[in-house]
Amino acid sequence: MDTAFCRVTAFVRIERLSTVERALQAMDVRGVSVSRVKGYGEYVDFFANDWMGQHARIEVVTGSARAAAVVDAILAAASTGTPGDGILTVTPLESVWRIRTRRGAEAADL
């Protein structure tokens, strides 16, 4: 599926969040959503009562032509080279709408 928009979602270590934010700001990414999440996957915190680790979920909606650069920036900023660094996904989006204007957004605006 070839779409004009992508959502880049990354689950990264909390302590790497500010580094990732700075990397995205340096490349003039205009919008980022961040939330704290907990869970486990490849790396399980066996010392926690419920095995859950704290991570940050970062979501960026961008034009698909720019998605690879956003991915590269997040991977470079978030990686420590050790288990538990997180995961990153890229999802194509059919359309993006601005609520304020009730109009579809242009990929170049993101």
Image (tube, grey):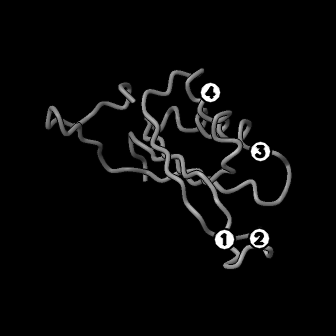
Q: Which mark is residue 79?
A: 3
The quadrant of the picture occupied by the N terminus is bottom left
Which element is circle 3 on? loop
Q: Residue furthest front?
A: 49
Please name the residue that numbered disc 4 is placed on. 22
Please name the residue that numbered disc 2 is placed on. 45
Mark pair 4, 1: CA separation: 27 Å
Q: Amino acid at mark 4?
A: Arg
Please name the residue that numbered disc 1 is placed on. 52
The image quadrant that residue 105 belongs to is top left
Q: Residue furthest left?
A: 102
Which element is circle 4 on? helix
Mark pair 3, 1: CA separation: 20 Å
Foreground: disc 3 or disc 4: 4
Mark pair 3, 4: CA separation: 14 Å
Q: Residues within 10 Å of mark 1 (few under 14, many from 20)?
A: some
Dot placed on the residue nearer the N-terminal end, 4 or 1: 4
Q: Amino acid at mark 1?
A: Met
Q: Amino acid at mark 3?
A: Ser
Q: Give the percent coordinates (x, y) of residue 99.
A: 19, 39
Q: Residues within 10 Å of mark 4 (few under 14, many from 20)?
A: some
